[in-house]
Image: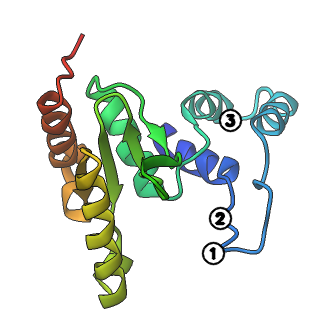
Amino acid sequence: MTIDEITVVADHLLRRPRPTFEDRSEPYCTREELEEMLDRHKGTPGIRKARLALEQARVGADSAPETRLRLALERAGLPEPELNQPTELGFGVVREPDLGYREQRVAVEYEGEGHSESAQIVRDIEREEDYSRAGWHLVRISKRHMGNDARTAVSKVLAAMQERGWTPK
């Protein structure tokens, strides 16, 4: 496995559960538990890659594509985004962008295959309208944007960030 593939696994293990979608209330493990496990296996082949992956791991990604997108954005020099953090867009309107840049008011949503279902399309339109009313720019990413090291996805997010005044350092 590559370091990024191991990072995807670590993000999944650290992920906050979504009680609406699953029957658990705690992450599969904590960062500390993963660190202890790595310490118990010093010298094991691949342990160095696993440690590097754990350094890249974050709590908050809900899917492998979200993790891959975050890593691609950071490698491209964009700031580290917030992951699935509740964001108040107006009175009683709270959304949790998959990746968010609060300062620039840029929300990034990865839309997997489930977003092609009729009911989900309606919810996605409503979500986009909520962001728009609140003055946020919503960047929608799909699988087709993730090829070629996510270059198209990175370009879309970079353009939105620059439109909102962000400049690379």
Does residue 41 appear anywhere in the picture?
Answer: yes
Residue depth check, mark 3 versus mark 1: number of the one nearer the observer: 1
In the picture of the structure, the residue carrying the numbered disc 2 is 18
Kindly identify which numbered label has been placed on residue 45. Answer: 3
Helix, strand or loop for disc 2: loop
Residue 124, quarter of the rendered image = bottom left
Instruction: From the top left corner, tell me how far across and down residue 111 is, in percent.
Output: 33, 66
Residue drawn at point x = 18 percent, y = 30 percent:
164
Say which residue appears at 62% left-offset and 54% top-offset.
12
Indicate left or right for 60 with 104 as reference: right
Q: Image height check: is 47 above or below 88?
A: above
Disc 1 to disc 2: CB gap under 8 Å: yes
25 or 7, nearer to the observer: 25
For the residue carrying disc 2, how many other residues have a C-alpha within 10 Å: few (<14), some (14-19), or many (20+)? Answer: few
Residue at image coords 12%, 36%: 159
Q: Nearer the viewer, mark 2 or mark 3?
A: 2
Residue type of the residue flagged with mark 2:
Arg
Q: Which residue is mark 1?
A: 21
Q: Quadrant of the C terminus?
A: top left
Tell me if label 3 and label 1 are in contact, CB under 8 Å. Answer: no
Outermost residue, front direction?
91
Q: Is residue 7 left or right of residue 153?
A: right
In the structure shown, which secondary structural element does the residue marked by tag 3 occupy? loop
Q: Where's residue 56, x and y in %? A: 54, 31
Q: Closer to the N terminus: mark 2 or mark 3?
A: 2
The residue tagged with tag 1: helix, strand or loop? loop
